[in-house]
Amino acid sequence: MALAPGDNATLFSAGAASTLRLIVYLAAAVVLMILDHRGHYLEAVRGHASLLIEPLYRLAALPADAARATRTAVASQSALAAENRELREALLLAQARLNRAGALAAQNERLQDLLEAQKSLGLSVQMASLLDIDIDPARRRIVINRGAQQGVSVGQPVIDASGIMGQVVEVLPNTAVVMLLTDPNHAIPVTIERTGLRTIAYGDKDARDLLELSNIPTSADVQVGDKLISSGLGGRFPAGFPVGEIRDVRNDDTGMFATALATPAAAISRSSEVLLLHDLPQPYGPAQPQVDASAPPGADAAPAEPAQPEPTP
């Protein structure tokens, strides 16, 4: 750039002023830094300045924070839903296992009762499990998992841990049908334990899972709560087994006889395991003669002759 003819400024005058101002600014900056370092005079200024600038920082970070919060919320909801689903499945599984354990405990208790009954009977018994129930309201019958191949025969008594349940009426190769005491076509000779009165207990005709004792003389002493046991008459059911308990006694229309209703002693509607009684040979006639073990095989023991009295002089 060309200078005007009347301009008296030197070539380095502008550069010298700028350098002088720079030196002054640098010196002032150094002094301020030393004073701030020594006396901390500018902390309050920086604090107020940060208060003014912080909203700008938050505004600038707002989109990123919103996106992060959205991702966190979605992920947390998915994780909570999955955890909730797993907990529900675990709860259902635990409940199923608990119910199964309760059922096994009840079954174990029933089997223990049957085992104790088997030991206390001192008879030959066979255990069987319930397979099916006849749903005909006019009949009371069940199907068990023992049949002809397992030695079951028609007429065989069936009991549980509490008393007599019924008898076998049909035998198949691997299953058998049992008529329960409460079947209208069933009858069992019983004895009232308290008085010794003998009578017949029939299945209830009204399908109430009860036993009916009819044609009882009004003079007989029959009371509510009397125990019924098998009398052994007829040779089908052994004597002394619990059959039921009297729950109601009332006179018939003629007033000459009484009718009683009894609750079966056996858990007919709840038992899932039963015992089959095997017939034991009953002795008939006089006892067999004893054979001398010292006699040779095949030799018949000769009866001893009565001693002859000595002749008197």
Image (tube, rainbow, N blue to C red):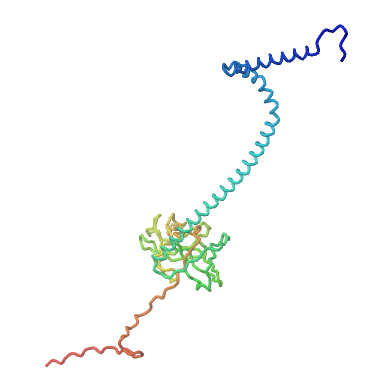
Q: Position of residue 38 (x, y in %)?
A: 57, 17
Quadrant location of the C terminus in the rendered image: bottom left
Quadrant location of the N terminus in the rendered image: top right
Residue nearer the viewer, 254 or 248 = 248
Q: Is residue 149 above or below residue 42?
A: below
Q: Is residue 175 above or below residue 93?
A: below
Q: Position of residue 141 (x, y in %)?
A: 54, 63
Residue 244, located in which quarter of the rendered image? bottom left
Residue furthest to the left? 313
Side (left or right) of 98 relative to 225: right
Q: Is residue 62 above or below residue 192?
A: above
Q: Position of residue 91 (x, y in %)?
A: 56, 47
Visible in this render: residue 141? no
Visible in this render: residue 38? yes
Residue 55, located in which quarter of the rendered image? top right
Residue at 65% x, 41% y is 78
Side (left or right) of 221 relative to 102: left
Residue at 45% x, 71% y is 278
Total numbered labels placed on residues in the image: 0
